[in-house]
Amino acid sequence: MNKLGGEVSSIKFFTGKFGNKIDEDGLLSESIFGPIHDFRCKCGKLSLESCDSGKVCDRCNVICASSDLRIKTFGKITLVFPVIKPTKRKLFKKIVGKDHKHLLDPRKADALAVTSRYLSCSLDGLELNVVDTLAQVPFNYIIPIRITGIYSFILALKFANEVLNSSAAKELFDKKYIIDIIKVLPPDIRPVIKDPKKKNEYRYAEINKHYISLINQNNLNLSSRDVARAKEKDWFERLKYNLDNNIDDELVDPIIPEYDRASARYQYYVDLIYESVFKNISGKTGFIRSSILGKTIEFSARSVVIIDPSLEPYKIKVSRKILYKLWFPYFLYYLANYKDIDYNTLFDNYTQFENYDSHKEIFSEFLNWFCSEQNQNMVNECKETPSVKILIKKRQQEQEQKDDIFE
């Protein structure tokens, strides 16, 4: 059984004779992502918040906790073959070079099979470059592993890290630029629902399809995991033995191109997963704008930026109406402390009706005060005071006291 946040290894959402039970190794697993029902395990043995909260059921292996876990708990898929992190591709382009950029594109993996590419590592270990010859380069070591795809490229980087102790290669692995674990988003973020028009069929977010494809690839290549690790050790020992001999013979093994083709498929599906995530969080319909920026925010304003050729690059003009919104707390502070307007008047005439046209003249006075160099100390005081919340709270307290007196 898996633990909370554990390994997802099944492509099934549901299982059982009638397809009404969640697969505990799948993408909706309760043991991996948390319970569906608040403070109730899957089998119902643990169901009391006061007594069982935080306990893991020994029968169904589901934690007795809040169902909110299903919106913040990530699972994982451990890949048989490592891949390049899609967000760090620019860094690898510098190593590969413009002439060989198709090496990083999994859709063009076969195009590299007929070419000869090798990884060059400087003797100080600070530079890595892909070259097209085994000929010795001064102050560089050419790793005799023909790069025919993503797997052989990462294999050469591993050799530079583990055998040549290259600091540049070590950084790639230490900072997780090359990854073998993919996080699985919480299930409540990528929902699965029954199709109302088609019996026994489901509708689900696009990213679920990519996870299914990746898990399928993993299950197909599981038998290669231990074989690949054993072969890598053997290859590294052979290359290490010949390290000081300046050999011209490259490492030849027919299984490497096969692993390159498999790695290309892994890289392709991982790229799709990252693209789906970026698509869901960016743009007007993305999670950030729809859930956060789409909400009402106090003391905010928006406008269209219009180019003014007379402005310096670091300057921008903002209308007074926008400043009225943005600096409203400071404006209230100014009125209360320097215009001696009582809190009741401020609350009734200003906080309830933020009308710029009605307060245009006094707001102009405030702007002169706020932007004056002579008043900088007072302005700094103003910025440290949360004026509006205090005003509203005081007004509410005053009204409550009056109500108590009348009662």
Image (tube, grey):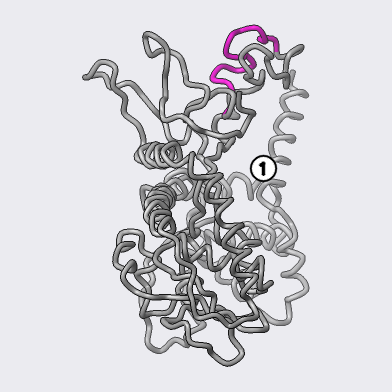
- Measured as percent of width and height from the top left, residue 334 is found at 68, 63
- Measured as percent of width and height from the top left, residue 34 is found at 59, 25
- Measured as percent of width and height from the top left, residue 60 is found at 61, 14
Residue 192 lies within the magenta run: no
Which quarter of the image is occupied by the N terminus? Answer: top right
Name the residue beneath numbered marker 1. 392
* Chief secondary structure of the magenta portion: loop
* Residue plotted at (39% across, 27% down): 192
Residue 38 seen: yes
Q: Is residue 222 left or right of residue 141?
A: left
Taking depth in this image into account, of 237 and 2 the one nearest to the observer is 237
Numbered label tally: 1
Taking depth in this image into account, of 69 and 150 the one nearest to the observer is 150
Residue 362 seen: no
Q: Is residue 168 left or right of residue 308?
A: right
- Measured as percent of width and height from the top left, residue 314 is found at 51, 83
Instruction: Indicate whether 70 appears above or below 107.
Output: above
The amino acid marked with disc number 1 is Ile
* Residue plotted at (47% across, 43% down): 291
Which quarter of the image is occupied by the C terminus? Answer: top right
Residue 45 lies within the magenta run: yes
Q: Is residue 241 left or right of residue 208?
A: right
* Residue plotted at (25% across, 15% down): 199
SS type, badge 1: helix
Taking depth in this image into account, of 90 and 188 the one nearest to the observer is 90
Within 10 angstroms of label 1, few (less than 14), some, or many (20 or more) residues? some
Q: Is residue 272 left or right of residue 236?
A: left
The residue segment tinted magenta is 33-48
Instruction: Indicate whether 393 appears above or below 45.
Output: below
* Residue plotted at (56% across, 34% down): 7
Q: Residue furthest bottom?
A: 138
